Image (cartoon, rainbow, N blue to C red):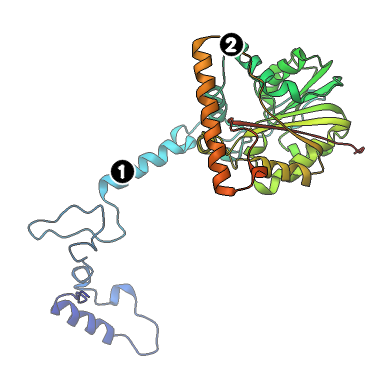
């Protein structure tokens, strides 16, 4: 154990005289009356491991930096970083927007921005655009591969919940639904779907909106929604989605598949993801929320006789077979094996009783 390092004898004597000058039991004397001589020298940090990390090596007996005081260069960097983060400090003319008051009936208006608490930020819109496919043919084929099997026989009215850029709206219209409506918390984004959807809905409080529209739809499509919710909001949201259905209607939910080879990337690749799902966890959520006739749907890929496609399919099938063997060795129960190891997990549930 290293001996405790103490200041020079002169500093200890001066400190003792300062303590003796205080009256016992009384208040401390004013700062300008204390004997503080030698205090700075006594408060010097010892050289070595106890010195602050940003302090450069001392040479020639230079006075080391005191603890708790950042280096000048570090202090300037912190100030510059704070200025970059604060939009008001960068631009004094920019201030939080005021609420313009109630909107006219039937009009869509974005919720007022409240700094970081805004429902949808411009940065998140750009994030969605970076992860969005621009090829309409590929988007349409992807929806057909994953969702054709889950659609109900009755195709009157459908809702694309969290419509985003409207790919689900276009798919449901092409699938034969007479009325396709869109909902999103981003009023500015959903307003761009005018002419593509039969009705547009926007609300910054989606749970309240779900409670106000029960029993209206034959199908509710919630693609890539539930994984963005906190645990305490997941069950109420799924319950609200089920209440939107007419008796016999179906709720189709699509989430990232945690047991796929890319499960970790899907969970943490998007900062707004709060959780990832397996078949057992998604089954629990749907059953606990009141869903019935639960089904999990595997993708139906189109067959292409090209060498590249055949090689890809063969390697993927071999890899999935190896994963099933690993799961069987680890858990020992064939009933616990996932139906597939694809990166997307699609399930549907029915609401049998009236809301």
With 281 as the anchor, is 155 left or right in this view?
right
- For residue 95, what is the image quadrant? top right
Residue 172 - label:
none
Q: Nearer the viewer, mark 1 or mark 2?
A: 2
Evaluate whether residue 166 shows in this view.
Answer: no
- Foreground: 311 or 64? 311
Query: What residue is rendered at 29% in x and 77% in y?
Result: 33
With 75 as the anchor, is 226 left or right in this view?
right
With 234 as the anchor, is 290 left or right in this view?
right
- In this view, 281 is above or below 133: below
- To which residue does mark 1 refer? 76
- Foreground: 19 or 160? 160
- To which residue does mark 2 refer? 304
What crowding class fits label 1: few (fewer than 14 Cα within 10 Å), some (14-19), or many (20 or more)? Answer: few
- Foreground: 327 or 57? 327
- In this view, 34 is above or below 261: below
Q: Residue 268: image x %, image y %?
A: 51, 38
With 52 as the anchor, is 204 left or right in this view?
right
Which quadrant does the N terminus fall into?
Answer: bottom left
Q: Could you tell which of marks 1 and 2 lies nearer the N-terminus?
A: 1
Q: Residue 279: image x %, image y %?
A: 67, 40
Q: Residue 343: image x %, image y %?
A: 58, 31
Instruction: Give the residue at the far bottom of this rendering.
Output: 24
For the image, the number of numbered tags is 2
Q: Secondary structure at mark 2?
A: loop
Which quadrant does the C terminus fall into?
Answer: top right
Query: What residue is rendered at 22% in x and 58% in y?
Result: 65
Q: CA distance from mark 1 to mark 2?
A: 60 Å
What crowding class fits label 2: few (fewer than 14 Cα within 10 Å), some (14-19), or many (20 or more)? Answer: few
Evaluate whether residue 257 shows in this view.
Answer: yes
């Amino acid at each position: 154990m290293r001996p405790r390092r103490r200041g020079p004898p002169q500093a200890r004597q001066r400190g003792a005289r300062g303590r003796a000058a205080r009256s016992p039991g009384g208040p401390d004397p004013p700062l300008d009356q204390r004997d503080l001589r030698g205090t700075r020298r006594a408060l010097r940090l010892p050289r070595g491991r106890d010195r602050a990390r940003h302090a450069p090596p001392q040479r020639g007996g230079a006075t080391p930096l005191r603890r708790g005081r950042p280096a000048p260069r570090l202090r300037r960097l912190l100030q510059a970083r704070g200025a970059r983060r604060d939009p008001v400090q960068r631009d004094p003319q920019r201030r939080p927007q005021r609420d313009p008051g109630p909107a006219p009936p039937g009009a869509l208006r974005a919720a007022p921005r409240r700094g970081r608490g805004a429902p949808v930020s411009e940065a998140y819109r750009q994030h969605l655009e970076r992860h969005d496919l621009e090829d309409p043919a590929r988007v349409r084929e992807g929806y057909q591969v994953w969702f054709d099997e889950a659609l109900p026989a009755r195709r009157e009215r459908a809702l694309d919940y969290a419509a985003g850029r409207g790919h689900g709206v276009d798919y449901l219209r092409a699938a034969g639904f007479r009325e396709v409506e869109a909902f999103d918390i981003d009023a500015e984004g959903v307003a761009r779907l005018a002419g593509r959807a039969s009705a547009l809905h926007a609300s910054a409080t989606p749970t309240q909106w779900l409670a106000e529209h029960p029993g209206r739809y034959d199908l509710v499509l919630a693609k890539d929604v539930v994984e963005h919710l906190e645990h305490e909001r997941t069950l109420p949201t799924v319950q609200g989605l089920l209440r939107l259905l007419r008796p016999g209607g179906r709720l189709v939910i699509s989430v990232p598949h945690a047991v796929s080879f890319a499960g970790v990337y899907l969970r943490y690749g998007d900062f707004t993801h709060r959780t990832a799902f397996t078949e057992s966890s998604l089954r629990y959520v749907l059953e606990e929320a009141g869903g019935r006739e639960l089904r999990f749907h595997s993708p139906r890929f189109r067959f292409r006789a090209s060498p590249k496609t055949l090689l890809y399919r063969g390697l993927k099938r071999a890899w999935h077979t190896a994963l099933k063997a690993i799961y069987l060795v680890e858990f020992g129960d064939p009933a616990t094996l996932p139906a597939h190891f694809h990166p997307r997990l699609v399930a549907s549930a029915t609401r049998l009783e009236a809301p």
